[in-house]
Amino acid sequence: MASTHDKDDFRAQARGIAEKHAQADQRQKRLLQGGIALLVVAVLVIAALVFWQVRSQRIPDSGPVPASANQWGGIEMTADGITKDSSDTDEVSADDAGDPPETPPETPEAEGIVEPGTAADSDEPVQIVIWQDFDCVHCAEFEETHAEDLAKLVDAGEATVEYRTVNYLDSATYYSSRSAAAFYEVANQVGTDEALAFQEEMFTHQGTGGLDDDEIVEIASKHGADIEQAMDDQDWRPMVDYTSATAQADGVNGTPTVMVDGVVWEQGSSLSEAVKAAAEGKDPNEAGGEASDSASGGATESPSASASGSSTASAEPTEG
C-alpha cells in the first residue's frame, strides 16, 4: 500500500505534467496566432499590390495637358512665376511619342530646347531643362546639391528652369508616376517658390520605398496646394506617360539629364558658374571645377537604355 508521501509525489508529478502540457498548449496557441497575423499581413500586402495594379490599368492612353505644362511635359519656372497655358495642344498620348533611337544621340534631340548660345545672343535668361524622376537617387543628390542655386537663379531672372519629370523607375506602386502627376497639380495651383519647395521636400523621401497618395497630398498641402481630388482622379497620369515616352524617343536615357542653354551640362562646376558662362556665350561645361560624383557616374538609366545597354547623354549611367 502506497504511503502518504508517495501519494504526494504522484500528485506533484501529475501537476507538473499537466503544467507542461498547458505551457505547450499556450506556445502552440501563440505560434498559431503569430502565423495568422503574418498571413493577414501577407494578404494585405498582396491586396495593396493588386490595388495598385488595378489602378494602373485604369489609366487611359491619352489625357489632358495640365495648365502648368507645355506640350513636351515641362513645368517652366521663371522669376514671374510658373508659365501657364503655354501648350499648343490640349491632349496628349504616349502612343504619339515615337520609339527610342537604336543608337542614343550624344545630345538629346528634344523639342523646346534652345540652340547653344541663345542666351548671349538674345539677352534672355539662360534656359535650364532637367529630366528627373522622383524615385531616382541621383536626382535626389542633384536636388540636394543644386536646389538653392536653382532657386536663386530663377528668382534673380538669370535663368528659367524647366522640369520634365518622368516615370523611368516605376514599380508596383507607380510611385514615379504618381509623384510626377502630383507635381503637375501642385504647379497648377501655386507659384515658383512653393513648387520648388514641394519638389525639394519630395526628394528628401527618395529611397524610403515611395510615399502613398495621402502622404503626397499632405506634403502638397504644406506648400499651399490641395491635390487630393487630382490624385484620386489621376487626370495627369497620361501626361506623365507621354512625357516619359517622349523623353525616351528623344534620346534621354537617364536621370538626371540637364541641359543648360542647349548644351548637356556635365555638372563639372557650380550651376551658377555654368549659367554665367552661358550668358557670356561660352560653353557651360567650360566654367571650370572638378566633375561632381553625380556627374561622373550619376544617372539612372531609362528602361529602354537598361535593355539595350546604352548610356545616357549626360553621363555614364549607373543603376539607381
Image (tube, rainbow, N blue to C red):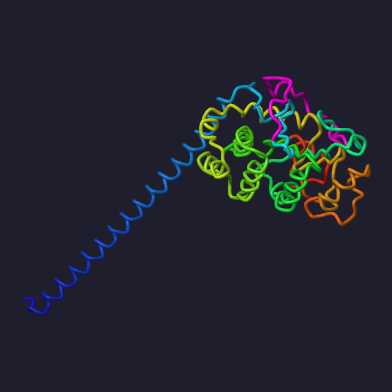
x%, y% of residue 23?
Answer: 27, 62
Relative placement, left or right, of 188 versus 312 is left
Identify whether 196 is placed above or below 96. Answer: below
x%, y% of residue 184?
Answer: 64, 33
Q: Is residue 103 magenta?
A: yes
Identify whether 64 is placed above or below 131. Answer: above
The dominant secondary structure in magenta is loop
**In the figure, residue 234 lies in which quadrant?**
top right
Residue range highlighted in magenta: 82-108
Identify whether 31 is placed above or below 195. Answer: below
- Quadrant of the image for the N terminus? bottom left
x%, y% of residue 47?
Answer: 46, 36
Residue closer to the observer: 129 or 169:
129
Relative placement, left or right, of 46 versus 27 is right
Relative placement, left or right, of 200 versus 276 is left
Rendered residue at 56%/40% (across/down): 224
Identify whether 163 is placed above or below 71. Answer: below
